Amino acid sequence: MIASRRLISNCLPFYSFGMERDSKGLAIVIKSTKIRERDRLLTLFSPSLGIVNAVSYGARKSIKGIKAPLYTEGTFSLEKGRGGMTLKDIDVISTHDALLEDLDSAQSAMLFSDLILTARSSEPELYALYTAALDALESESFEKVSVEFLVHFLSLEGISGDYTTCPICGKDYDKAEILGFSSSEGVPVCHDCDTMNGALLLPPNARAYLKRSLELDFQDSLDLHVSEEQEHRIFRYLLRTLPFSFPGKLRSLEYGIWRI
């Protein structure tokens, strides 16, 4: 459920008052963990404060406790005490309820969160990408959204090729060239630089699709059309290459419902 549209360029920074004890700003709950009998430890992703933990007291049982379920986005009011940050109030923008009702959408959201948390990245561009992807999961194919999120995330992190030139030898790809993959560099490469003996191949039409995706912003890339079969193949390709491309352990893939 979306209460209003977000504009990252106009988003509230986290304002601090009174010797930096109180903070208020735009954020989203990217992880929620049970602690003690009634409380939850919320991991918030903010375009201005970064990744921060805050305790929500009484969130699990108290009627008066402030509820901020996983993937809730809004303007959060936090208070800093001796034990760390605590949640005082929230003005909700979106709850993303639908993500918890579909296993594949929930798995996609877990993967997106896993990548953000593992990378410890908090740039406003990544916040915009992450929240836009969660919004899209409520109405678009989870495979399409996952493909576009992964392509744009890896590009923002500087760990993807451009699908035009081999990043190792500098060769320009032929239009009909089938790409291999470099396990050491974690990117698609030309046939001569392939270190995986053809185990991860990217055909020309799939490469053209990914190249075009990178030329568009995330929202516009969702309007690209491809057959469901081709979309599934690209989705599977990105899942299989992700462990080589991304330098971090992704529990969402290791213990999730998808088999890669």
Image: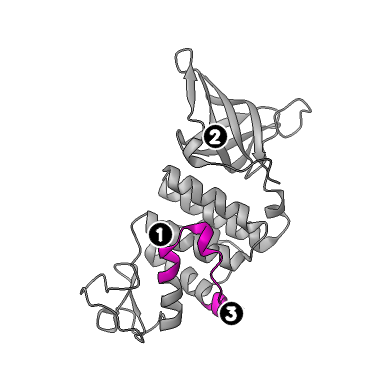
User: Residue 227, which numbered label?
Assistant: 3
Residue 247 is at least partly visible in this image? no
Pick the residue in front: 38 or 169.
169
Q: Magenta region, mostly helix, strand or loop?
A: helix
Using the rendered view, name the quadrant where residue 94 is placed. Answer: top right
Pick the residue in front: 22 or 93.
93
Residue extent of the magenta highlight:
211-233
Amino acid type of the residue tagged 2 in the rendering: Leu
Decide: marks 1, 3 in contact (CB < 8 A)? no
Using the rendered view, name the quadrant where residue 204 is placed. Answer: bottom left
Residue wearing tag 2: 26
Work out which residue is located at the far right of the displayed protein and give it: 63
As measured in the structure, the alpha-carbon distance from the residue carrying label 3 to the one carrying label 2 is 37 Å
Amino acid type of the residue tagged 3 in the rendering: Ser
Pick the residue in front: 257 or 213.
213
User: Residue 154, which numbered label?
Assistant: 1
Using the rendered view, name the quadrant where residue 87 is placed. Answer: top right
Residue 64 is at least partly visible in this image? yes
**Colour logic:** one colour
**How dense is the environment of label 1, judged by Cα within 10 Å: few (below 14), some, or many (20 and up)?**
some
Q: Position of residue 250 (x, y in %)?
A: 48, 58
Decide: marks 3, 2 in contact (CB < 8 A)? no
As measured in the structure, the alpha-carbon distance from the residue carrying label 2 to the one carrying label 1 is 24 Å
In the image, is residue 116 above or below residue 224?
above
Q: Position of residue 125 (x, y in %)?
A: 44, 47
**How dense is the environment of label 2, judged by Cα within 10 Å: few (below 14), some, or many (20 and up)?**
many
Based on the picture, tell me whether residue 221 belongs to the magenta stretch: yes
Q: Which of the marked residues, 2 or 1, is nearer the chain's N terminus? A: 2
As measured in the structure, the alpha-carbon distance from the residue carrying label 1 to the one carrying label 3 is 24 Å
Q: Secondary structure at mark 3?
A: loop
In the image, is residue 47 above or below residue 185?
above
